[in-house]
Image (cartoon, rainbow, N blue to C red):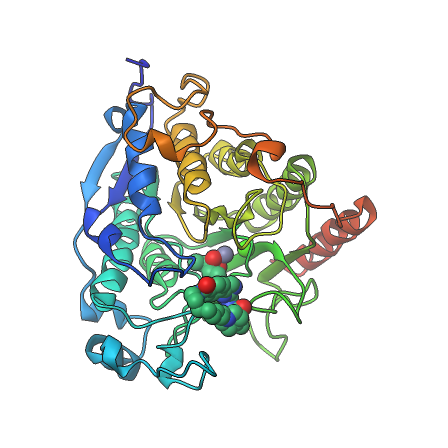
Amino acid sequence: EYNIVRPKGYTVSYHATPEMEKHHFGQTHPMKPWRLTLTKSLVTSYGMPFAMDNYVTREATYEELNTFHSSDYLDYLITAAPEDQPRDIENPDKEVKYNLGGSDCPLFHGLYNYCSMSAGVSLDAARKITSNQSDIAIAWAGGLHHAKRYEASGFCYINDIVLAILQLLRTHPRVLYIDIDVHHGDGVEEAFFSTDRVMTVSFHKYHPETFFPGTGALEDNGPKSEHNPGAHHAINVPLQDGITDAQYEWLFESIIGAINERYRPSVIALQCGADSLAGDRLGRFNLRVEGHGACVRYCKSLGIPMVVFGGGGYTPRNVARAWAYETSIAIGADDRIPETIPEHAPWREHFIHETLFPTLEQSMHEPRHNRNSEKRLREIVTHVHEQLRFVA
Ligand code: ZL4
Ligand code: CA
Ligand code: ZN
């Protein structure tokens, strides 16, 4: 009814599984897998599935997870039960095995299923790119960028992005990884520290003492040990509270534009964490859905195949808005979908304001003070340009 048709000349695939959405991290935990249900329902209400190839994916196998994660860690993840959770009210973050069972990465019923589902979605998306069956593959259930080879971290247990990039590397010489989650994409950065076939770029709030995970300084560009081909292939864009759409879009286009010219990636992996939006429960920025989506539009305009992942996002109605809007950008329907949340959308009552694009005032009681000076943003761009001189 909104005249949503398949895009001309390219294919978009949408990868999901309703299985993932039924899992719970715990009543008050910020991560709500249910936000994926809300996203899917908004995408469907706008009629977007008509314009895409839609896949319901299977769980990733142990062998697939093992291409990055250690067997010791996976074996524990399979068998660890919520009963193994250290219940210590005095000290909820007491030392635990593989960082599992604390308040950030709780053990919950069906945890292994949740993890292998998320990884399955991202791997499926990456495979559609490597087999040339899709040009933009969407995996909102993925994007769990903090997980390490042998350890869970920051709500992430399995690094589906690393697994997907390993798949992309089978047919692509150079992968550009871009991360617009408000947190530093440390797990993905670290996994590819020693190769020049993956360049990682993370935009994030940086404040080592107070903001997780505390890494990702401007000067951290990959270990500069002798003969490390991966040196200079990690780019970090450390930001402060309150950055606006205009500043973020300028930074994003200056930096990604320069990287694209110099590095010439053959495929892009874009993590679209929605906790960089204004009004996010954990976030600190003043981005609107339009500004967040502009990053997706810019990447698409480069005309390179792309896998699009989810990630953080702790105010579910805004996560659904951003990822539905970004789905519309992928299929080229962003100028055709109405700004008002469809009349017939289930869950419509969750969208307090009935628009896809809430204003800053609608997103939060008081917009955050912007602590990013124009001078500092120019310094960041200059530093990135200097790093790129080392890139062959
Ligand atoms: C919570 O309310 O900064 C977990 C986590 C659980 C329920 C009740 C338990 C109360 C906020 C966060 C105790 C909570 C103590 N519950 C949490 C150093 C910390 C140790 C844990 O978007 N405490 C750790 C991780 C970050 C820390 C952010 C972002 C993931 C991603 C990709 C991960 N961890 C201090 C905090 C709550 C909770 C409320 C919380 N945890 C906020 N920030 C963190 O990049 C998906
Ligand atoms: Ca980031
Ligand atoms: Zn995040």
| Foreground pick, 2 / 242 | 242
Viewed as shown, does residue 306 lie left or right of 223? Answer: left
Q: Position of residue 292 (x, y in %)?
A: 54, 38
- Could you tell me if residue 194 is visible in this image? no
| Foreground pick, 205 / 196 | 205
- The quarter of the picture where the C terminus appears is bottom right
Q: Position of residue 291 (x, y in %)?
A: 58, 35
Q: Position of residue 130 (x, y in %)?
A: 29, 48
Res 128 → quadrant: top left
Viewed as shown, does residue 266 lie left or right of 210? Answer: left
| Foreground pick, 174 / 314 | 314
Q: Position of residue 70 (x, y in %)?
A: 31, 79
Viewed as shown, does residue 323 lie left or right of 134? Answer: right
| Foreground pick, 108 / 97 | 108
Residue at 62% over, 33% down: 361
- The quarter of the picture where the N terminus appears is top left
Residue at 42% over, 39% down: 317
Viewed as shown, does residue 187 lie left or right of 217? Answer: left
